Image (cartoon, grey):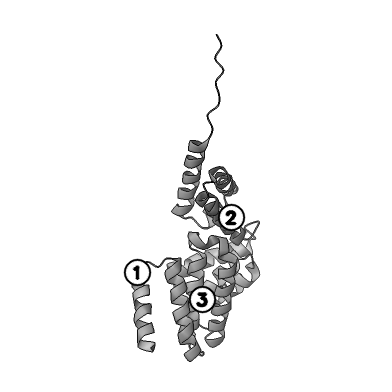
Amino acid sequence: MISDIGSQLILLDVKSVDPDGLNKKIALLKILHLLDPQNFGLAHKIGVAYFDLGMSYAEMNRIQVHLKEARLWLEKARRLNGADAGNLNLLGQVCYLAGSYHQSRLYWKKAVELMAEGEEQTELRTRLSRIDAARLPEKPLVNSLELIGAALEHLHLDEFAQAREIMENLDAIGELPREMPNPEFFYLLGLSRENAMIRQVPTKVTRWL
């Protein structure tokens, strides 16, 4: 059974994984974790999978749930190995998205100390400087990401005007595209605008004779 689970996990790792694939991956990893609860790697991988699931645009209407699970498993991993920079970095990201900036600072500070010099360490130092200077989002970014999930639901229901309103508000505020630049954001913004314009009822023209 274990070898079969391992084979399935390898297949899921080598291809682009959609939400269904991530859910399957999580279920398989949890089976292995039951057999080996002290395995840092398994707990960390479950946390990473939940994070990836939450950051999938198709699952953003449930991002709060997924990030809570991600933090739970990453914390389990941290208790098993508190000196893994990658795990601490991801814990910091989860806390930052949730608006727990003090906690994210603690994790990132420790991660920077453990990392070798390089681009990733430089990026974390920049994030720490922004926290120290209080250059932070006014509201937790997870709230904005959850709104993207709501906009997607409107799009699926052909409620294009509502989707456009949400996306344009997020674009006007600017925090989400600035903090987390992603081409999918601008694709959804353009898609909602285009479809809302198509759906607009033409204005009746009064002809003067």
For image coordinates 56% across by 60% down, the residue present is: 61
Give the residue pinned by disc 1. Answer: 15
- Mark 3 and mark 1 in contact? Answer it, CB < 8 Å: no
Q: Earlier in the sequence, mark 2 or mark 3?
A: 3
Q: Is residue 192 above or below residue 122?
A: above
Q: Which residue type carries mark 2?
A: Leu
Task: Tell me which corner region of the image, top left, top right, bottom left or bottom right, holds residue 142.
Answer: bottom right
Mark 2 element type:
helix
Q: CA distance from mark 2 to mark 3?
A: 23 Å
Mark on residue 39?
A: none
Tell me the quarter of the image containing the N terminus.
bottom left
For image coordinates 54% across by 78% down, the residue present is: 74
Residue 62 lies left or right of residue 119; in this view the side is: right
Q: Nearer the viewer, residue 181 or 8?
A: 8
Q: Position of residue 116 (x, y in %)?
A: 44, 76
Q: Which residue type carries mark 1?
A: Lys
For image coordinates 51% across by 46% down, the residue present is: 158
Within 10 angstroms of label 2, few (less than 14), some, or many (20 or more) residues?
some
Mark 3 element type:
helix
Q: Earlier in the sequence, mark 3 or mark 1?
A: 1
Give the residue pinned by disc 3. Answer: 47
Residue 68 lies left or right of residue 183; in this view the side is: right
Mark on residue 147?
A: 2
Mark 1 element type:
loop
Q: Which residue type carries mark 3?
A: Gly
Within 10 angstroms of label 3, few (less than 14), some, or many (20 or more) residues?
many
For image coordinates 55% across by 64% down, the residue present is: 127
Looking at the rendered image, the disc whose residue lies closer to the viewer, 2 or 3, is 2
Answer whether residue 45 is visible to the viewer in this image: no
Q: CA distance from mark 3 to mark 1?
A: 19 Å
